Amino acid sequence: MVITEGKMKKIRILLFLFGNVQGVGLRKKILEKRNKDFKTIAGFAKNLPPPDRNVEIALEGDYGNIICFEKWIGELEGVKQTKVIRENYTGEFTDFEIR
């Protein structure tokens, strides 16, 4: 669901990354890119336990920023496939963290 605040559309997505995505510094790269270029995006990145060993990322923020950040994440080395789940925007997060 997209929420409009003023003229900015706010969205929330869950992004699951598949491939060689654990133990390679992927979450750190995502945090660094967020802190450099996407400071208004909030959420988290966390490793999922075995046997899957995938990464889950929650993102909330302006529609355009989320779409650009999602595209950048999907092109990272080691990411073979992504799955996106769109959810209702909640405003739950105030920052971005590695869990």
Image: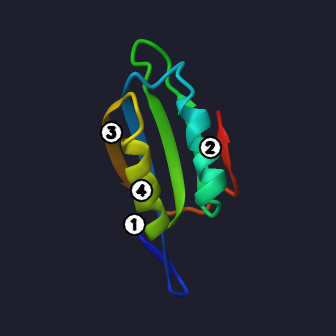
| Residue bearing mark 1 | 1
Q: Give the Cα distance between marks 1 and 4.
A: 6 Å
| Residue bearing mark 2 | 31
Label 3 residue SS: strand
Disc 3 residue type?
Thr
Q: Earlier in the sequence, mark 2 or mark 1?
A: 1
Q: Earlier in the sequence, mark 1 or mark 4?
A: 1
Q: Earlier in the sequence, mark 3 or mark 1?
A: 1
Marks 3 and 1 in Cβ contact (< 8 Å): no
- For residue 23, side relative to residue 73 (left or right): right
Disc 4 residue type?
Glu
Instruction: Name the residue located 67 percent from the left edge and 42 percent from the top edge.
Output: 97
Marks 4 and 2 in Cβ contact (< 8 Å): no
Give the quadrant of the C terminus: top right
Instruction: Name the residue located 34 percent from the left edge and 47 percent from the top edge.
Output: 84
Is 92 or 98 nearer to us in this picture?
A: 98
| Residue bearing mark 4 | 87
Label 1 residue SS: loop
Disc 2 residue type?
Leu
Callout 3 environment at 10 Å: few (<14), some (14 to 19), or many (20+)? Answer: some
Q: Give the Cα distance between marks 3 and 2.
A: 18 Å
| Residue bearing mark 3 | 82
Q: Give the Cα distance between marks 2 and 1.
A: 25 Å
Q: Quadrant of residue 41?
A: bottom right
Q: Give the Cα distance between marks 4 and 2.
A: 21 Å
Q: Give the Cα distance between marks 3 and 4.
A: 16 Å
Is 58 or 67 nearer to us in this picture?
A: 67
Q: Earlier in the sequence, mark 4 or mark 2?
A: 2
Callout 4 environment at 10 Å: few (<14), some (14 to 19), or many (20+)? Answer: some
Q: Earlier in the sequence, mark 3 or mark 2?
A: 2
Marks 1 and 4 in Cβ contact (< 8 Å): yes
